[in-house]
Image: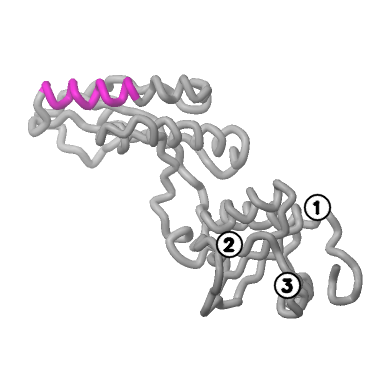
Amino acid sequence: MTAAGWPTPPGNTSLDARRRDRELAITVDGDPVDVLVVGGGVTGAGVALDAASRGLSVALAEAHDLAFGTSRWSSKLVHGGLRYLAGGDVAVAWESAVERDILMRHTAPHLVRALPIVTPLTPEVSRSAAALVHTGLRIGDVLRRAAGTPHSVLPGPRRLTAVETLGLAPALRETGLRGGLVYWDGQLVDDARLVVALARTAAGHGARILTRLRVEHIEGPGAADGG
């Protein structure tokens, strides 16, 4: 119930000052929640959404604004786990490929686009090293296809000619350039906007999104740091 005796309408995703004041008053008055999330980064907003969408009552407390820290200054790369493949962690690489597919085709197709990434084959890159990189890219592409991401969303990796490589990376030296390898990954247009979208969707499921509220002490279980 609101401070005025009326509940927040279901499906209302607005995060305005009036709603904040109302839900802050409810929280201060001791109205309990099932889940308290501390931190309004992408992890915190995601946890709040997941819990609220399952029917749990949720309050998220953020000392500053949504996406105040790392989530506002990320690399903006929604990668499909290639870095984990290099370390032999196939399970995490697979999870990354699946999550990338969800973001690009379901959760935020308007915020994630395909990004070409070029590895130039310069004289410093041996042919054996180039073959190893190409093999890794092909394995990563197997994960892409297994995750269900179509070629129209993320093209597969391929070998580039020297001319094509210079077209994508014109700052390269032409001397000794044998070509390049290109693969495609996901790139966020605006990382902070994704956090806000998650938080607003969580609010639509009834979560209390309380910015400018610093948590200084917690006792007992049930709190997750989502910064």
User: Residues under labels 3 and 2: Cα distance?
Assistant: 22 Å
What label sits on residue 222 in the rendered view? 2
Question: Which mark is nearer the camera, 2 or 1?
Answer: 2
Range of residues picked out in magenta: 127-139
Residue 55 coordinates in the image, percent (x, y): 74, 50
Secondary structure beneath disc 3?
helix
Q: Earlier in the sequence, mark 1 or mark 3?
A: 1
Left or right relative to 90: residue 180: left
Give the residue pinned by disc 1: 11
Left or right relative to 105: residue 58: right
Residue 164 coordinates in the image, percent (x, y): 29, 25
Is residue 35 visible in the rendered image? The answer is yes
Is residue 197 visible in the rendered image? The answer is no
Q: What residue type is labelled 2?
A: Gly
User: Residues under labels 1 and 3: Cα distance?
Assistant: 16 Å
Comparing 157 with 196, the one in front is 196
Q: Which amino acid does label 1 sit on?
A: Gly
What label sits on residue 20 in the rendered view? 3
Residue 90: in magenta span: no
Question: Which mark is nearer the camera, 3 or 2?
Answer: 2
Q: Which amino acid does label 3 sit on?
A: Arg
**Location of residue 69 (image quadrant):** bottom left
Q: What residue lies at 49% left-to-right and 25% top-to-bottom? A: 147
